[in-house]
Amino acid sequence: MPFCSNCGAEVKENAKFCDKCGTAINANNQQINTQNTTSGITCPKCGSIIPLGNTTCLNCGMPLNQESNTAAIILGYIGTILGALLFPIIGIIIGLVASIYLLTRQNKSSKIHGVIILIILLIVAGLWFSYMSYIY
């Protein structure tokens, strides 16, 4: 079996894209696949059968299970910022839960928003604790 030139993962015969990183596979390095894969799901983009356990379509390279996590992102930003202004402890909790949730997602965009929410959370928590220590 051939290996991906980008990440070194073993790729299936006749795959056009690496299942791990999505890099296009050079067709000259492929061997002819004599097996017919019938178990799996159908790719929504190209209609080919994707074997179970793969994260990308081996024919067109379309990533599967792309979650947008829009609700968690919006809740994280609004909850952290408004919570910080109205109820700081609740804002810190909402920000912490939202950032941890987003950081555990596979989507790169969700991870970036999780980091941003975590940074906002740390700033808000630092300001709140500074203010509380100033008052008392």
Image: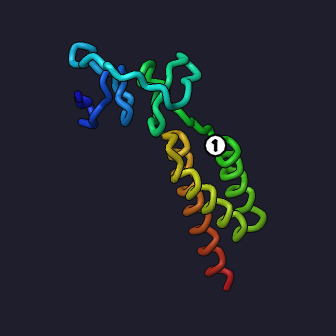
Left or right: where 118 falls relative to 9: right
Q: Position of residue 68 (x, y in %)?
A: 62, 38
Report the residue at 60% width, 39% height from top.
Answer: 67
Q: Foreground: 90 or 31?
A: 31
- Disc 1 secondary structure class: loop
Q: Residue furthest top?
A: 28
Give the residue number, with chain letter if any, for mark 1: 69
Q: Position of residue 88 (x, y in %)?
A: 71, 68
Which quarter of the figure has residue 97? Answer: bottom right
Label 1: how many residues lie within 10 Å, few (<14), some (14-19) or many (20+)? some
Report the residue at 59% width, 74% height from top.
Answer: 130
Which of the image's four quarters has the N terminus?
top left
Which of the image's four quarters has the C terminus?
bottom right
Left or right: where 65 falls relative to 83: left
Report the residue at 27% width, 35% height from top.
Answer: 10
Identity of the amino acid at label 1?
A: Asn
